[in-house]
Image: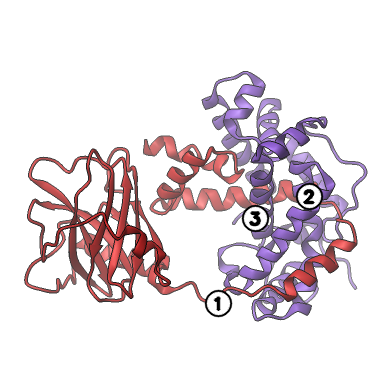
Chain colours: A purple, B red
Amino acid sequence: MPEVNPVRRFRSMSGEGDARGAIDDPAARLTTAFTRGGRGDEGAFAEIYDALSGLVYGVILNVVRDPSMSEEVAQEVFVELWRLAPRFDAERGSPRTWAATIAHRRAVDRVSSEDARRRRDERELVVFDEPTDVVIEAVTTELDRQRLWAALATLTETQREAMTLAYYGGHTYRAVAVLLDVPEGTIKTRVRDGLIRLRDQLGVMS
Amino acid sequence: MTSELHHLAGAYALDALEDSERVAFEQHLASCDSCAVEVADFRATAAMLAEGVATAPPPHLKSKVMAEVARTRQVPPTVVPLRGRRPIRMAVASVAAGLLIVALGAAAVLRSGRTDGIEDVIAAADAVTVNLAATEDLEGDPGMLRLVWSAERDEVVVIGDGLADPGAGKVHQLWLLVDDEAVPEDLLVPEDGAIRQVLEVSDRTAEGWGVTIEPATGSATPSPPILYAG
């Protein structure tokens, strides 16, 4: 298979790939799999699982921390993706964004319960660090990952801190304000400004 | 309030709002195109943060997921057009423009709302919940307004809180929106801005619902603007 232009691959991850074009485009393949999965095709859903399991499990693990609980949440998320697949609409966003959104929401819901929070808080909270021991999903090339780190590096320290505590830490912006001992309005602004800069750096379009 | 809500788009996309704020923001989102675009972009950006921490799950998870998938029923394919975004927006737009409105019936037939029977409507097999979002024409705090509608019973439960006083000699009135028609329904009678009320409604297949402010006796055609729609 000829090497795919890395920029194109990167863009395709954010749903910008040409869904009707190249067959070797992972985004197009995933969209097609969702169409078939939406018609009850379990084989197509197995493909969806293979393409999204690293993304879904990774974001949940980052928020939830506990591996066995993360597994439970990941299973719930995939069953939810299956259940809702008939309503998946490629016009409204990429499958990867959809899956990441549902996975993060479920993870946050899970840690919101008192018990889960207590268990998680016993573990060390890593604000932001490049993970070194993770298995990288096939579609996420090392180059894509480096681009993300490079984009994050353009944020101010305070923006990065607020955003990563909120997203990876699964905290509300109010909780982040308490953790960092700054006014809530400041955190709201840092989160939003950080996302705007990251969006522009990565060229993400919904 | 509204400009404050705009600034919540980032925290919303990161699932970092308190529950009450999330509800308020989602109501705002339904009627604010610029926030909807921003949230979609932010969600796609947040998904990139997720990509950055992708981690392969334990291999046995796949067979557990597939076993669960095999016994899980999928939702029906189409989002029921009843409350689909497009038809509602079209209906609202045509009402706002004051065009093509054909009010059915000579006048709004006023029926007294009641509070008994709320549970019966909510428990009806065909009951659907419709969140009425504040439109751009509503100034100030929108509060919360929600319908539970049973088409079978031709009844809706109106549940609301924090509704603004419509002003002296004025009332809130409910409209059933279908095609380009706004069918007059009953008046809403909140107490201190809160409402829990059962209304009988027309036997029509609603595409959406709207709320306007009308003279105390109600109107046969809606007086723009529509303040809530869903």
Residue A167 visible (yes or no): yes
Q: Is residue B103 left or right of residue B85?
A: left
Which one is in front, B217 or B133? B217
Specify the subunit that label 2 lies on.
Answer: A
Disc 1 chain ID:
B
Query: Between A192 and A122, which is closer to the camera in this rendering?
Result: A122
Give coordinates of residue B55: x percent, y percent: 85, 51
Task: Identify the element where label 2 is drawn.
Answer: helix
| Tag shown at residue A70 | 2
Label drawn at residue B77: 1
Q: Vertically, is B225 above or below B6? A: below
Residue found 24% across the figure and 73% down from its top: B180
Q: What residue type is labelled 2?
A: Ser
Q: How crowded is mark 2: few (under 14 residues within 10 Å), some or many (20 or more)?
A: many
Same chain check for tags 1 and 2:
no
Please state which amino acid type lies under the numbered disc 3: Ile
Residue A203 visible in rendering = no
The residues bearing labels 3 and 2 have C-alpha atoms spaced at a distance of 14 Å
Vertical placement of A57 versus B124: above or below? above
For disc 1, the neighbor class at 10 Å (few under 14, some 14 to 19, many from 20) is few
Q: Name the residue under label 3.
A: A102
In the rendered image, residue A122, in percent from the top left (x then y), is placed at 80, 30
